[in-house]
Image (cartoon, coloured by chain):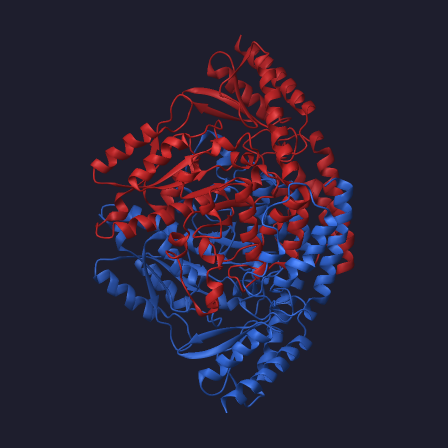
Chain colours: A blue, B red
Amino acid sequence: MESVEFLERGKQLMNYIIDYFDTVDQRKTLPDVEPGYMKSLIPEEAPQKADEWKNVFGDLEKIIMPGITHWQSPHFHAFYPSGTCYASILAEMLSNSLSCVGFSWASSPACTELEFAMMDWLAKMLQLPEEFLSTGEGGGVIQGTASESTFLMLLAARSKALSKHINSSKSIKKLVVYTSDQAHSSVERACLLAAVEYRSVPSNENEEMTGEALEEMIQKDIDNGLIPFYVVATLGTTPSCAFDRLLEVGPVCKKHDIWLHIDAAYAGSSFICPEFRPLLDGVEFADSFNFNPHKWLLVTFDCSTLWLKNKKYLVESFNVDRIYLESKEKEKLLDYRNWQIPLGRRFRSLKIWFVLRLMGINNLQSYIRKHVELAKEFENLVRSSEKFEITHPVTMGIVCFRLKGDDQLTKNLHDALYKDKRIYLIAGASKSRYYLRFVVCSQRTTSDDINYAWKVINELSMTSLRERL
Amino acid sequence: MESVEFLERGKQLMNYIIDYFDTVDQRKTLPDVEPGYMKSLIPEEAPQKADEWKNVFGDLEKIIMPGITHWQSPHFHAFYPSGTCYASILAEMLSNSLSCVGFSWASSPACTELEFAMMDWLAKMLQLPEEFLSTGEGGGVIQGTASESTFLMLLAARSKALSKHINSSKSIKKLVVYTSDQAHSSVERACLLAAVEYRSVPSNENEEMTGEALEEMIQKDIDNGLIPFYVVATLGTTPSCAFDRLLEVGPVCKKHDIWLHIDAAYAGSSFICPEFRPLLDGVEFADSFNFNPHKWLLVTFDCSTLWLKNKKYLVESFNVDRIYLESKEKEKLLDYRNWQIPLGRRFRSLKIWFVLRLMGINNLQSYIRKHVELAKEFENLVRSSEKFEITHPVTMGIVCFRLKGDDQLTKNLHDALYKDKRIYLIAGASKSRYYLRFVVCSQRTTSDDINYAWKVINELSMTSLRERL
């Protein structure tokens, strides 16, 4: 493809994208296909000769779109948002054109330096303690996902613990990780990957991890000769957006010299609003903090931002030098390659820069607040109905609710919604109650969409209740 | 940014990108900045109010470009290529707009199914053994980088080994990994991350790992009660593009039931040409195989393709279920979330699809062949000079060479090139000889650029030789 064609095709594709965003609410949110649907639509081998653009472009509606779950639809209320916006899409276009691989300072100084700057900007927007800024021992780095951040910090913590307990033989077998029973699956998975013990701390009636429950478990393990070394606290859990009691958990970690990592994947973005910032109180106890601008700050996936108070356990523990990775002395400190699992890295700070500048903090705050307001609207609708009940406090853009009565009713409703495909929500279960999670996800969601979702839910709940009779 | 503005800005940016590609050869390949250059150019905090596009766009030339190492320049000859092309950039624009997170089949069926299809297309283009196709126990998956693939396969191999040696206490401490002393740093780093022993097998005079050297090391470890479990063979090493002796290494791994992983990050793309396919002979012994279409197949970074013969050690070992990850029974087998370290995943198969269709296998073969020819041209220039010598056989798009005489001469030349900044090459060292690596990287490189590089090298080598007098 030559440059003239690129310009032509690019315009066509941009118009297609604009049209997609403008009309995505008219598509079924969940695709109407069965596993294996694409097999008959795609040849078994790559073409020998170049195909024409018009065929590829035409196949988008024929082959790709029928199988897309529309995360950008205002009727998408599952998981958590996967935000994107025009500013971010443009930044990515430039980044993909430069296609520079910034593993060291010299391999692309702008890529490294803009990332340092953006991580400081974000840290200040969240009012993170100063130790997390790049001006001292700490600093921030962009990872792909929160799962990678959790795993990487576990490895850094393990490294710190092993250097402390160097005289204890078999010490890796004695290491123990703690997190709430409400924490994301990726914490347990990180323990499997790192081959260390995993403890699930029972949450309280509000699904928060308390200092008391954590302390009890840690003390028991210490008494048995084990080595507690890593705690993951969650601010805004995946099942119900609960917040662990950081002000209790923090001192417990301090007391036992345990690495405290905070996973605020979804809720973290809200801390740019002063009214939500108190939810982050206690972050001063943390060794590392992570949230995902790709969830709720309109930066296109993937962009998971991670800060450490002291990067040395990460940078020094896993440093391997080779002549082709050689850096000048004063550049070494800036080499991001030792801050992550992969060697290569994309120019992701560009999209943060575009979004923060072209939106401004004000507009991002309004965007967060609008989602929280829309969630409140949905909460009010649920509360106004005699059939439904709210199961968890609503603080962010997520509402947990269920049909009154036994779980099967809500399960039937969930099944009916999955089959219906107009809106998409997923289920949660806690303290043996089955419920549905309604999350405001799209940048384009309005009150009309909330009412639409409520109408669909009501309509299908009638069937669900009737089936029961 | 509204849709009208997106279209306007997008056109402006596309023209900027076209102009960038057309004139990148006129920029210094290495940027002329010192560490910390950006500090004075960027405010210390994010803006409260939205900034105007024209300011952000204007800052590209003021703030970003002065710090870019131009990986797309025809004068970039460092590391290995980081390919990109217009077709791939367009695919990414669409992928970033859909911004669907395809961790499970249901979370975006098209994202999952196109990836299965593309991994089979590529496998067939490389004539991988049938066991690697998705039709059986095996299959392919897109990772971010080769480092992640190496690490992930190590974890899968560890899991397999531990399940076999379950009765051996402290067995994780006994596990040993083997790779050539020419292998990429990421293998040693993977061992650090996984906390297992690492062995560097001495390569022969051609920098190949032989079966004999490997067998000797393995046997010694077995005699000492250790458990060899993972071997990484490299096809096209980073220092000099050497090829390990797969047909010898394979049977050694087979004999001792050791997981054999092949890292063909750079050279892998060349196997789509029948004349280079023999270099892959012996792949039938491998448990897993990896190469990077983002290096030499014009698919924008990141896109590292990994195949396994039997995915169960990966998928079953690290599976953690939660209600929000629930899949219907028949969809489970298609969930890519257990094939990787992160949970979330981007729609990366779209760019493979665009590139393969819009280029066709023929054009991709021509592109590979052109790079190899240009390397031969450079080799001939070096051979025609009395001052220089070729240090390694030239089989792909890389030429290793040095100034005759002691290493210091070549070191001086390297320093002079780094300071000069017109072209970018990096050094290698092996068998105590210091040399320079000249790699053909850009899609736009022509004979003129080869001659230009040769002119610059000659010019600077004069200084280097004069300094010596």
Report which quarter residue B282 is drawn in: top left
Residue B245: percent from the left, percent from the top? 40, 29
Report which quarter residue A297 is drawn in: bottom right
Q: Return the residue nearer the eye: A129 or B280.
A: B280
Report which quarter residue B299 is drawn in: top right
The number of numbered discs placed on residues in the rendered structure image is 0
Task: Give the farthest residue toward the bottom.
Answer: A469
Q: Is residue A341 left or right of residue B113?
A: left
Figure check: B298 above or below B376: below
Q: Return the residue nearer the eye: B193 or A263.
A: B193
Q: Is residue B383 left or right of residue A315?
A: right
* Residue found 48% across the figure and 59% down from its top: B335
Q: Is residue B446 left or right of residue A106?
A: right
Residue B375: percent from the left, percent from the top? 59, 24
Task: Give the farthest residue toward the top.
Answer: B469
Figure check: A25 above or below A57: below
User: The N terminus of chain A is located in which quarter?
Assistant: top right
Q: Return the residue nearer the eye: B397 or A397.
A: B397
In this rendering, does residue B236 appear at all?
no
In this rendering, does residue A315 appear at all?
yes
Residue A175: percent from the left, percent from the top? 29, 55
Residue B310: percent from the left, percent from the top? 41, 50
Figure check: B191 above or below B115: above
Figure check: A12 above or below B233: below
Q: Is residue B279 left or right of residue A424?
A: left
Q: Return the residue nearer the eye: A128 or A115.
A: A115
* Residue found 25% across the figure and 36% down from its top: B221
